[in-house]
Amino acid sequence: METRLTITAQFISDGRSLGYEGERLERYVAEQKEDYEKVKKEEFEREKARFEREERLKAEAKAEEKARFEREEKAKREEHERWKERDAREEHKRKEEMELERMKEKSATAAGTATQAEVRPRNVLDKLDKSFQGMKEDDDLMAYLTHFEAVATRCKIDRKEWSLLLSYKLTTFLRNCMLRDSLFLNENYEEVRVVLLRHADINAETCRKRFHRVKPRQNDFRGFVTELRNALDHWLKMAEVGKTVEEVKELLVKDRILENV
Protein backbone atom coordinates (compact mmCIF):
# COMPACT_ATOMS: atom_id res chain seq x y z
CA MET A 1 0.00 0.00 0.00
CA GLU A 2 2.81 2.37 0.98
CA THR A 3 4.61 1.59 -2.27
CA ARG A 4 1.50 2.33 -4.33
CA LEU A 5 1.01 5.69 -2.51
CA THR A 6 4.67 6.52 -3.03
CA ILE A 7 4.43 5.73 -6.74
CA THR A 8 1.20 7.75 -7.07
CA ALA A 9 2.83 10.68 -5.32
CA GLN A 10 5.80 10.38 -7.68
CA PHE A 11 3.47 10.46 -10.68
CA ILE A 12 1.69 13.55 -9.27
CA SER A 13 5.04 15.24 -8.71
CA ASP A 14 6.18 14.36 -12.22
CA GLY A 15 2.91 15.68 -13.69
CA ARG A 16 3.14 18.96 -11.84
CA SER A 17 6.75 19.39 -12.95
CA LEU A 18 5.41 19.09 -16.49
CA GLY A 19 2.90 21.86 -15.75
CA TYR A 20 -0.20 19.65 -15.44
CA GLU A 21 -2.97 20.63 -13.06
CA GLY A 22 -6.53 19.53 -12.41
CA GLU A 23 -8.01 17.08 -14.91
CA ARG A 24 -4.87 16.97 -17.05
CA LEU A 25 -2.85 16.00 -13.99
CA GLU A 26 -5.37 13.30 -13.03
CA ARG A 27 -5.35 11.92 -16.58
CA TYR A 28 -1.55 11.93 -16.63
CA VAL A 29 -1.35 10.11 -13.28
CA ALA A 30 -3.96 7.54 -14.42
CA GLU A 31 -2.03 6.85 -17.65
CA GLN A 32 1.25 6.48 -15.77
CA LYS A 33 -0.35 4.13 -13.25
CA GLU A 34 -1.84 2.05 -16.08
CA ASP A 35 1.55 1.79 -17.79
CA TYR A 36 3.18 0.94 -14.48
CA GLU A 37 0.62 -1.82 -13.73
CA LYS A 38 1.08 -3.20 -17.25
CA VAL A 39 4.86 -3.37 -16.85
CA LYS A 40 4.54 -5.00 -13.41
CA LYS A 41 2.06 -7.54 -14.78
CA GLU A 42 4.41 -8.42 -17.66
CA GLU A 43 7.28 -8.80 -15.21
CA PHE A 44 5.11 -11.04 -13.04
CA GLU A 45 4.09 -13.18 -16.02
CA ARG A 46 7.72 -13.53 -17.11
CA GLU A 47 8.79 -14.49 -13.61
CA LYS A 48 5.91 -16.93 -13.31
CA ALA A 49 6.80 -18.52 -16.68
CA ARG A 50 10.47 -18.75 -15.67
CA PHE A 51 9.54 -20.40 -12.36
CA GLU A 52 7.17 -22.85 -14.07
CA ARG A 53 9.83 -23.69 -16.67
CA GLU A 54 12.42 -24.35 -13.96
CA GLU A 55 9.95 -26.51 -12.02
CA ARG A 56 9.09 -28.44 -15.19
CA LEU A 57 12.77 -29.03 -15.97
CA LYS A 58 13.35 -30.19 -12.40
CA ALA A 59 10.38 -32.57 -12.64
CA GLU A 60 11.60 -33.92 -16.00
CA ALA A 61 15.11 -34.40 -14.66
CA LYS A 62 13.74 -36.15 -11.60
CA ALA A 63 11.52 -38.38 -13.75
CA GLU A 64 14.43 -39.23 -16.05
CA GLU A 65 16.62 -40.05 -13.07
CA LYS A 66 13.89 -42.27 -11.66
CA ALA A 67 13.41 -43.98 -15.04
CA ARG A 68 17.16 -44.51 -15.40
CA PHE A 69 17.34 -46.00 -11.91
CA GLU A 70 14.40 -48.29 -12.67
CA ARG A 71 16.01 -49.38 -15.95
CA GLU A 72 19.26 -50.17 -14.19
CA GLU A 73 17.45 -52.08 -11.45
CA LYS A 74 15.42 -54.01 -14.03
CA ALA A 75 18.58 -54.86 -15.97
CA LYS A 76 20.22 -56.08 -12.75
CA ARG A 77 17.19 -58.22 -11.90
CA GLU A 78 17.04 -59.68 -15.42
CA GLU A 79 20.76 -60.43 -15.35
CA HIS A 80 20.34 -62.09 -11.96
CA GLU A 81 17.42 -64.16 -13.27
CA ARG A 82 19.44 -65.20 -16.33
CA TRP A 83 22.25 -66.41 -14.10
CA LYS A 84 19.78 -68.25 -11.89
CA GLU A 85 18.13 -69.90 -14.90
CA ARG A 86 21.50 -70.87 -16.36
CA ASP A 87 22.63 -72.36 -13.04
CA ALA A 88 19.30 -74.16 -12.70
CA ARG A 89 19.58 -75.57 -16.24
CA GLU A 90 23.12 -76.74 -15.62
CA GLU A 91 22.14 -78.33 -12.32
CA HIS A 92 19.10 -79.96 -13.92
CA LYS A 93 21.22 -81.28 -16.78
CA ARG A 94 23.82 -82.61 -14.34
CA LYS A 95 21.14 -84.42 -12.33
CA GLU A 96 19.62 -85.87 -15.51
CA GLU A 97 22.99 -87.18 -16.64
CA MET A 98 23.63 -88.67 -13.21
CA GLU A 99 20.19 -90.28 -13.19
CA LEU A 100 20.68 -91.64 -16.69
CA GLU A 101 24.01 -93.15 -15.71
CA ARG A 102 22.47 -94.58 -12.55
CA MET A 103 19.66 -96.21 -14.52
CA LYS A 104 22.13 -97.66 -17.02
CA GLU A 105 24.35 -99.04 -14.28
CA LYS A 106 21.34 -100.48 -12.48
CA SER A 107 20.10 -102.20 -15.62
CA ALA A 108 23.57 -103.49 -16.44
CA THR A 109 24.03 -104.85 -12.92
CA ALA A 110 20.68 -106.61 -13.03
CA ALA A 111 21.75 -108.29 -16.27
CA GLY A 112 25.13 -109.25 -14.82
CA THR A 113 27.00 -107.21 -17.42
CA ALA A 114 28.11 -104.13 -15.53
CA THR A 115 31.55 -104.01 -17.12
CA GLN A 116 30.17 -104.38 -20.61
CA ALA A 117 27.59 -101.67 -19.95
CA GLU A 118 30.33 -99.21 -18.97
CA VAL A 119 32.30 -99.83 -22.14
CA ARG A 120 29.43 -100.20 -24.55
CA PRO A 121 28.03 -96.64 -24.58
CA ARG A 122 31.47 -95.18 -25.09
CA ASN A 123 32.23 -97.56 -27.95
CA VAL A 124 28.87 -96.82 -29.57
CA LEU A 125 29.47 -93.07 -29.39
CA ASP A 126 32.92 -93.55 -30.89
CA LYS A 127 31.32 -95.24 -33.89
CA LEU A 128 29.06 -92.29 -34.69
CA ASP A 129 30.22 -89.62 -37.09
CA LYS A 130 31.80 -86.87 -34.95
CA SER A 131 30.15 -84.18 -37.10
CA PHE A 132 26.67 -85.39 -36.12
CA GLN A 133 25.28 -82.76 -33.73
CA GLY A 134 22.87 -83.14 -30.83
CA MET A 135 19.26 -82.13 -31.40
CA LYS A 136 18.30 -78.50 -30.76
CA GLU A 137 14.99 -77.39 -29.24
CA ASP A 138 13.74 -75.96 -32.54
CA ASP A 139 14.79 -78.93 -34.70
CA ASP A 140 12.10 -80.96 -36.45
CA LEU A 141 12.06 -84.35 -34.68
CA MET A 142 11.04 -86.39 -37.72
CA ALA A 143 13.75 -84.81 -39.88
CA TYR A 144 16.30 -85.26 -37.10
CA LEU A 145 15.46 -88.96 -36.67
CA THR A 146 15.71 -89.50 -40.43
CA HIS A 147 19.15 -87.85 -40.41
CA PHE A 148 20.21 -89.90 -37.37
CA GLU A 149 19.13 -93.14 -39.04
CA ALA A 150 21.06 -92.28 -42.20
CA VAL A 151 24.23 -91.47 -40.22
CA ALA A 152 23.93 -94.55 -38.01
CA THR A 153 23.44 -96.73 -41.09
CA ARG A 154 26.42 -95.16 -42.85
CA CYS A 155 28.56 -95.71 -39.73
CA LYS A 156 27.44 -99.37 -39.71
CA ILE A 157 26.19 -99.26 -36.11
CA ASP A 158 24.17 -102.24 -34.94
CA ARG A 159 20.47 -101.28 -35.07
CA LYS A 160 20.02 -102.73 -31.55
CA GLU A 161 22.30 -99.95 -30.25
CA TRP A 162 20.46 -97.08 -31.94
CA SER A 163 18.11 -96.35 -29.03
CA LEU A 164 20.95 -96.06 -26.53
CA LEU A 165 22.99 -93.90 -28.87
CA LEU A 166 20.02 -91.66 -29.67
CA SER A 167 19.42 -90.98 -25.96
CA TYR A 168 22.70 -89.02 -25.87
CA LYS A 169 21.66 -86.77 -28.75
CA LEU A 170 18.07 -85.72 -28.04
CA THR A 171 16.74 -82.61 -26.30
CA THR A 172 16.26 -82.57 -22.53
CA PHE A 173 12.51 -83.17 -22.82
CA LEU A 174 12.83 -86.19 -25.11
CA ARG A 175 15.80 -87.56 -23.18
CA ASN A 176 13.66 -87.41 -20.03
CA CYS A 177 10.94 -89.34 -21.86
CA MET A 178 13.44 -92.05 -22.77
CA LEU A 179 14.76 -92.11 -19.22
CA ARG A 180 11.32 -92.28 -17.65
CA ASP A 181 10.16 -95.10 -19.92
CA SER A 182 13.59 -96.85 -20.01
CA LEU A 183 13.47 -96.55 -23.80
CA PHE A 184 17.27 -96.38 -24.06
CA LEU A 185 17.30 -100.08 -23.06
CA ASN A 186 14.86 -101.04 -25.80
CA GLU A 187 16.72 -102.70 -28.68
CA ASN A 188 13.70 -102.32 -30.98
CA TYR A 189 14.44 -98.91 -32.46
CA GLU A 190 11.16 -98.73 -34.40
CA GLU A 191 9.16 -98.95 -31.16
CA VAL A 192 11.30 -96.23 -29.59
CA ARG A 193 10.87 -94.05 -32.68
CA VAL A 194 7.07 -94.28 -32.57
CA VAL A 195 6.96 -93.45 -28.84
CA LEU A 196 9.21 -90.40 -29.31
CA LEU A 197 7.12 -89.09 -32.19
CA ARG A 198 3.96 -89.45 -30.13
CA HIS A 199 5.60 -87.59 -27.24
CA ALA A 200 6.22 -84.78 -29.74
CA ASP A 201 2.54 -84.85 -30.83
CA ILE A 202 3.42 -86.33 -34.22
CA ASN A 203 0.77 -88.86 -35.26
CA ALA A 204 -0.74 -90.41 -38.37
CA GLU A 205 -2.72 -87.25 -39.18
CA THR A 206 0.37 -85.07 -38.79
CA CYS A 207 2.30 -87.35 -41.15
CA ARG A 208 -0.57 -87.37 -43.65
CA LYS A 209 -0.50 -83.58 -43.83
CA ARG A 210 3.29 -83.58 -44.16
CA PHE A 211 3.02 -86.01 -47.06
CA HIS A 212 0.72 -83.58 -48.87
CA ARG A 213 3.05 -80.64 -48.16
CA VAL A 214 5.98 -82.22 -50.02
CA LYS A 215 6.49 -80.17 -53.18
CA PRO A 216 8.72 -80.73 -56.24
CA ARG A 217 12.13 -79.07 -56.04
CA GLN A 218 13.52 -77.11 -58.93
CA ASN A 219 16.17 -79.15 -60.77
CA ASP A 220 16.08 -81.83 -58.05
CA PHE A 221 13.57 -84.48 -59.06
CA ARG A 222 15.52 -87.20 -57.26
CA GLY A 223 15.43 -85.22 -54.00
CA PHE A 224 11.69 -84.71 -54.40
CA VAL A 225 11.10 -88.45 -54.89
CA THR A 226 13.26 -89.30 -51.87
CA GLU A 227 11.45 -86.80 -49.66
CA LEU A 228 8.09 -88.09 -50.91
CA ARG A 229 9.07 -91.70 -50.17
CA ASN A 230 10.27 -90.77 -46.68
CA ALA A 231 7.06 -88.86 -45.95
CA LEU A 232 4.99 -91.84 -47.10
CA ASP A 233 7.06 -94.25 -44.96
CA HIS A 234 6.53 -92.04 -41.89
CA TRP A 235 2.81 -91.90 -42.59
CA LEU A 236 2.52 -95.69 -42.99
CA LYS A 237 4.45 -96.29 -39.75
CA MET A 238 2.43 -93.85 -37.66
CA ALA A 239 -0.84 -95.13 -39.16
CA GLU A 240 0.36 -98.70 -38.44
CA VAL A 241 -0.36 -99.68 -42.02
CA GLY A 242 1.63 -102.34 -43.87
CA LYS A 243 3.25 -101.83 -47.25
CA THR A 244 1.18 -104.28 -49.28
CA VAL A 245 -0.58 -102.88 -52.32
CA GLU A 246 -4.02 -103.42 -50.77
CA GLU A 247 -3.09 -101.73 -47.48
CA VAL A 248 -1.55 -98.71 -49.17
CA LYS A 249 -4.49 -98.50 -51.58
CA GLU A 250 -6.93 -98.51 -48.65
CA LEU A 251 -4.96 -95.74 -46.94
CA LEU A 252 -4.92 -93.57 -50.05
CA VAL A 253 -8.65 -94.06 -50.60
CA LYS A 254 -9.34 -92.91 -47.03
CA ASP A 255 -7.04 -89.96 -47.59
CA ARG A 256 -8.94 -88.86 -50.68
CA ILE A 257 -12.19 -89.11 -48.76
CA LEU A 258 -10.78 -86.91 -45.97
CA GLU A 259 -9.49 -84.37 -48.48
CA ASN A 260 -12.93 -84.03 -50.05
CA VAL A 261 -15.09 -84.02 -46.93
Image: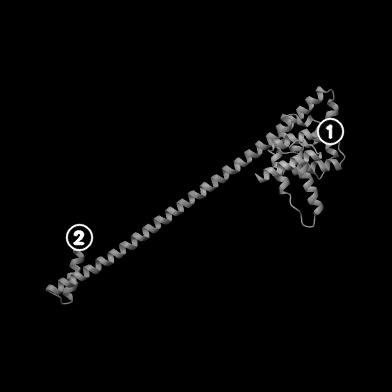
Position of residue 4 relative to residue 202, above or below, is below
Residue 20: give x, y in percent of width and height.
Answer: 15, 75
Q: Earlier in the sequence, mark 1 or mark 2?
A: 2
Report whether 102 appears left or right of 36: right
Say which residue appears at 39% left-offset and 59% top-offset: 53
Q: Residue at x 83, y 30 (%)?
A: 118
Picture coordinates of residue 178, whole percent (x, y): 74, 32
Residue occupying the point 63% across, 40% down: 83
Image position of 38 with respect to 72: above or below: below
Task: Report crowding for label 1: few under 14, some 14 to 19, many 20 or more residues within 10 A (C-alpha).
Answer: few
Q: Quadrant of the C terminus?
A: top right
Hey, what amino acid is under mark 1? Lys
Which residue bears the numbered disc 2? Answer: 2
Residue 4 place in picture, x, y as percent = 20, 63
Q: Give the residue at x 81% y 36%.
A: 162
The residue that disc 1 covers is 160
Quarter of the rendering occupied by the N terminus: bottom left
